[in-house]
């Protein structure tokens, strides 16, 4: 699961006291709802309340920024640990089984979010076709990512998957008409060269299995393009519900091909992986709400550091110089796409 986001309805009790509005009718979300306009996930962001109700209190803004950065770093540790668990389980289970068993516990997070954000009315999508399309891309992305862990070392596969933001830049320009300036063009070029360095297509070291994480990166970018297209038309909890439900359904269908019943220890690992994925996604959303995206987005690439550590600790894998150089180029390219201003 990429960043790939679950944004619940803004809750005033999450805001510091000095940043929250004094009356419910002062909240722009309540005002918008009273006019019958669509929900927007950024209506109650901390920065807006800090400017409007907190008088731009710098102490609170700095505290929120530090907390947002901490949440993002913590989410990278949890997500990478969850990926390591998935890779460990690939020794005994195929990708569909891992998705199915892992998503069972992940549905508990979905149920909690739905209860918090409005109940079963969120099960009815406003834009069903796009919501289902986004869910389909999410399922395929998850499948290919788990397959990547099975055929490549954790850090190697993750380095290739991180080319996804560069692909997203290209696809956003082609499909959504977004402008790609000099910075975006430089990011695409650097990312492309980085992938070539890692793949080494003209040498005997080339591995065809590297196509699997590259496909995962493409599917991740496709999912994110549909997410951008959805914009504020669909509640994020609804998007997450359909993505998880489709994952559970597709993973369940693969059990007809081959099914291995987990032992008690594997059940614990599956449950931990599902809960960790949900918690990490929640932390990512909290991070983006508390701190500027341009600050916390690059912190996601700390996952590569943790992946090297987990890979060395559990399997004795260390990336070679080509993977290291190419991975650094891909991360630089991805960071260029997240900087403020036009890409």
Image (tube, grey):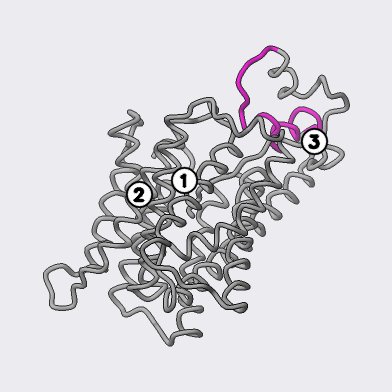
Residue at image x 80%, y 21%? 26
Residue at image x 59%, y 53%? 281
Q: Percent from the top left, x then y, of residue 252? A: 46, 56
Q: Quadrant of residue 180?
A: top left
134 vs 228, nearest the viewer: 134
Quarter of the image where the C terminus is located? top left
Drawn side of residue 163 relative to residue 132, left or right: left
Give whichever of discs 3 and 1 has the lower sequence position: 3
Check disc 3 and report the residue beneath it: 12
Crowding at dot 1, Cα within 10 Å, few <14 / some 14-19 / many 20+, comes out as some
Helix, strand or loop at label 3? It is helix
Crowding at dot 3, Cα within 10 Å, few <14 / some 14-19 / many 20+, comes out as some
Check disc 1 and report the residue beneath it: 339
Q: Are marks 2 and 1 in contact (CB under 8 Å)?
A: no
Check disc 2 and report the residue beneath it: 219
Mark nearer the viewer, 2 or 3: 2
Mark nearer the viewer, 3 or 1: 3
Give whichever of discs 2 and 1 has the lower sequence position: 2
| Secondary structure mostly taken by the magenta-highlighted segment of the chain | loop
Q: Is residue 38 magenta?
A: yes
241 vs 47, nearest the viewer: 241
Mark nearer the viewer, 2 or 1: 2
Q: Percent from the top left, x then y, of residue 146? A: 41, 64
Drawn side of residue 329 relative to residue 23, left or right: left
Query: Magenta residues, as a range?
Result: 35-55
Give whichever of discs 2 and 3 has the lower sequence position: 3
52 vs 5, nearest the viewer: 5
Helix, strand or loop at label 1? It is loop
| Total marks placed | 3
């Amino acid at each position: 699961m990429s960043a790939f986001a679950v944004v619940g309805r803004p809750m005033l009790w999450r805001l510091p006291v000095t940043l929250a509005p004094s009356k419910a009718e002062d909240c722009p979300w309540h005002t918008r709802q009273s006019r019958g306009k669509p929900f927007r996930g950024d209506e109650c962001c901390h920065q807006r309340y800090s400017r409007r109700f907190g008088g731009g209190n710098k102490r609170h803004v700095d505290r929120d920024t530090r907390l947002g950065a901490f949440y993002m770093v913590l989410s990278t540790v949890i997500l990478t640990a969850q990926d390591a668990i998935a890779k460990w389980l690939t020794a005994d289970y195929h990708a569909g089984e891992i998705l199915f068993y892992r998503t069972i516990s992940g549905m508990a997070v979905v149920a909690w979010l739905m209860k918090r954000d409005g109940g079963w009315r969120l099960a009815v999508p406003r834009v069903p076709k796009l919501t289902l399309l986004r869910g389909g891309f999410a399922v395929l992305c998850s499948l290919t990512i788990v397959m990547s862990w099975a055929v490549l070392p954790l850090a190697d596969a993750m380095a290739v998957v991180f080319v996804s933001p560069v692909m997203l830049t290209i696809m956003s320009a082609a499909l959504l008409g977004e402008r790609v300036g000099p910075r975006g063009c430089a990011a695409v070029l650097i990312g492309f060269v980085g992938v070539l360095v890692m793949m080494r297509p003209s040498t005997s070291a080339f591995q065809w299995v590297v196509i699997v994480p590259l496909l995962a990166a493409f599917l991740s970018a496709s999912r994110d393009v549909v997410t951008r297209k959805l914009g504020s038309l669909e509640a994020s909890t609804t998007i997450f519900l359909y993505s998880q439900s489709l994952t559970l359904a597709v993973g369940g269908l693969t059990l007809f091909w081959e099914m291995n019943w987990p032992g008690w220890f594997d059940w614990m690992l599956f449950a931990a992986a599902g809960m960790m994925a949900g918690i990490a996604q929640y932390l990512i959303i909290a991070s983006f709400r508390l701190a500027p995206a341009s600050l916390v987005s690059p912190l996601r690439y700390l996952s590569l550091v943790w992946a090297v550590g987990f890979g060395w600790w559990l399997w004795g894998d260390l990336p070679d110089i080509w993977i290291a150089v190419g991975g650094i180029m891909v991360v630089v390219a991805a960071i260029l796409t997240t900087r403020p201003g036009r890409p």
